[in-house]
Amino acid sequence: MDFLIEQLPRYLDGALITVQLTAGGSALAFVLAMVFGILGSMKHWLPRAVATVYVEVFRGIAALVLMFWMAYALPLVSGYKLDDTFAAIVALGINLGAYGAEVVRAAVNAVPKAQVEACVALNMSWFQRTRLVVLPQAWAQMLPTFGNLVIELMKATAVAYLIGVADLTAVAQQIRSATGETVLAFTGALILYYLIAQVLIFGMRLLERRANRKLGRIPPGGTGLLALLRPPSVGTKVGVAK
Amino acid sequence: MPPSDTPTNARPQGGGAGAGGGPLIVFDQVVKRFGDLTVLDHLDFSVDPGERVTLIGPSGSGKTTILRLLMTLEKVTEGVIRVGGEPFSHMPRGGSGGLVPAGESYLRERRKRIGMVFQQFNLFPNMTVRQNVIEAPVHVLGIPKEEANAKAEQLLDLVGLADKVDAHPTQLSGGQQQRVAIARALAMSPEILLLDEVTSALDPELVAGVLDVLREVAESTDITMLCVTHEMGFARDVSHRVLMFDQGQIAEEGTPDQIFGDPQEERTRSFLRSVLDNGV
C-alpha cells in the first residue's frame, strides 16, 4: 500500500494521459459515428454506400495496427510525423467510430415510421425532422451502447504505450522495471483503470437518465443519485408516446 | 365563406363561392396499387372549399389511402390529384405541359395547405405539449416564437388542455393526446384537415371529448375536412357529404340523411348494419 501511495503521482500522470486518449478518441468517434450513422440511415444509395464503406473498412482493421500505421507508416508515406498521442487518438476514434456509426444507424432506423409521417404532415424538411424529432428520440436508444463503446475505447487506449505514449500502462511498465515490483506495479494500474471505467459508467448513466426523462419516462431504477450505481432495467422502449 | 352557408344537403357543385370558384381537391382517375393489390381503382371525386366530407366503408376499401395520398405519405400509381387547381401528386414538367411525379421541394410548397391527425396521435415524445404544437410553426413557417406560443395556448384552450401545456405526452390520456394532436395540426393553419380514424385507438369514454373538439373546429372555422371514421353519429352531425367506399371505388354518395336514412346500395346497407350491430 505504501508502495502504491509513493508511486501515486506517476500513476496519476499516466492516468491523465489515458483520460486524454479516452476523451479525444471518444469525441472523434462520436462525430464520426453521428455523421456516418446518419448517412447510413438515409434513403438515397450514395450516402448509404459511403457509410457502409467506412464502417466495413474500419471495423475490420485492428485499432493497434491502425495506430502503428499512423505512427510509423504515415511518416514514410506523407513525410509528416504525427504526435504519438494524436496518432493514438485518431486510430482509436476512427476504429470505435465505425462501431458507433452502426449504433447510430440502428437507433435512427428504430424511430417509428409514424413519427416521421407526423413530421411530413407538419411539412418539416428532412433536416428539421432529423434534428427536432428523429435524433432526440434515437439518442436515448444509442446511449446504452455508446456507454459500452466508451468503456471499450478506454480499455483499448492501453495499447497506445506500444507507440510510445506515456499512458497508464506505460507508467506501470516503467514502475515495474524501475522497482521490480511486478505484482504491485500492475495492480496499481488495474485499480486506476477500474476507477476510470466507473466514472465513465456513472457519467453515461447520468446522460441516459436525462435522455429518458426528456422522453417523459420515469428514470429506470428510481430517481436518487444512488440509483445510477445500478444498471438500468432492460427493455425500455423508444417511440410513440402511448 | 363560412360552412354554415353551404347547403348541407348537396355538394356545392361547381357553384361554390369558395376560393377560386372550383373544387379544392380533385382526384382524377387515381389508381393506387401496393404490389398486386389495387387499393384505389380509377377513383374520381372532388371536394369543394369548406366542405366537410366523411369517408366510410369496410376496412381495406381505400379510405385511409386517400388521406395518405393527400398528405403525400404515399405516391399515386396512376392518375393525378389536384389541390386548388394545381397538380399535387405531380408537378408540371418545364415548358412541355406534361406532368412528372412531384419532387420534394415541390411537395413541401403544396403540403402547406394540408394538415393531418392520425389514428395513433403520433405526438413527439421528446417534446412537451407546448413544443409539440409550436415547433413546426416556428421552424417550418418561421413564425416568431412568442406568436407561436400565443397561438398554441389559444389552440390548447380550444381543445380544453390549457392546463397541460408543460406536460409530457406520456402523462396524458389517449383522448388528451389526440386533442393535442388536433391542436398541433391546426397550429399550421391548414386549409384542409385530414382526420384518419382519430377516435379508433381511444377508450370508449374518451371518444366524446375528441369529437366535441372536432365539432367545435367544424363550427368555428371554414376548414375543409376529410374524415375517415366509424363514428356515424359524428359523421351525421358535421359532414356535408358522405362517401361510401367499397373495393377502391365510391359505392354510393350523398348527404348524411340520404346515406344513413335511406341508403340505396345493398353494400351501403350491409356495411351500416354491421357497424351499428357492433354498437359503434
Image (cartoon, coloured by chain):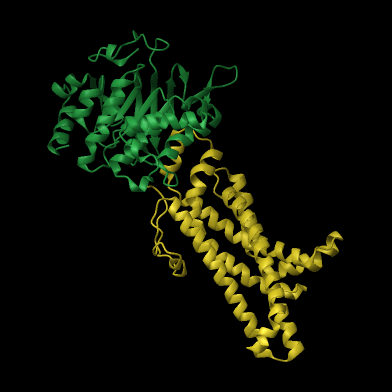
Chain colours: A yellow, B green
Image location of residue A91, percent across then percent down: 70, 64
* Residue A6 visible somewhere in the drawing: yes
- Work out whether residue A17 or residue A92 is closer to the camera in this orientation and state it: A17
Image location of residue A80, percent across then percent down: 85, 60
Residue B222: image quadrant is top left
The residue located at (64%, 80%) in the rendering is A189
Give the number of marks: 0
Seen in the image, is B138 located left or right of residue A220? right
Which residue is situated farthest in the bottom direction here?
A180
- Work out whether residue B91 or residue B226 is closer to the camera in this orientation and state it: B226
Seen in the image, is B186 located left or right of residue B265? right
Q: Is residue B116 above or below residue A167?
A: above
The residue located at (58%, 65%) in the rendering is A150
Seen in the image, is A81 located left or right of residue B25? right
Which residue is situated farthest in the right direction here?
A79
Image location of residue A26, percent across then percent down: 63, 61
The residue located at (58%, 76%) in the rendering is A194
Seen in the image, is B34 located left or right of residue A81? left
Q: Is residue B145 above or below residue A15?
A: above
Residue B48: image quadrant is top left
Image location of residue A135, percent across then percent down: 52, 48
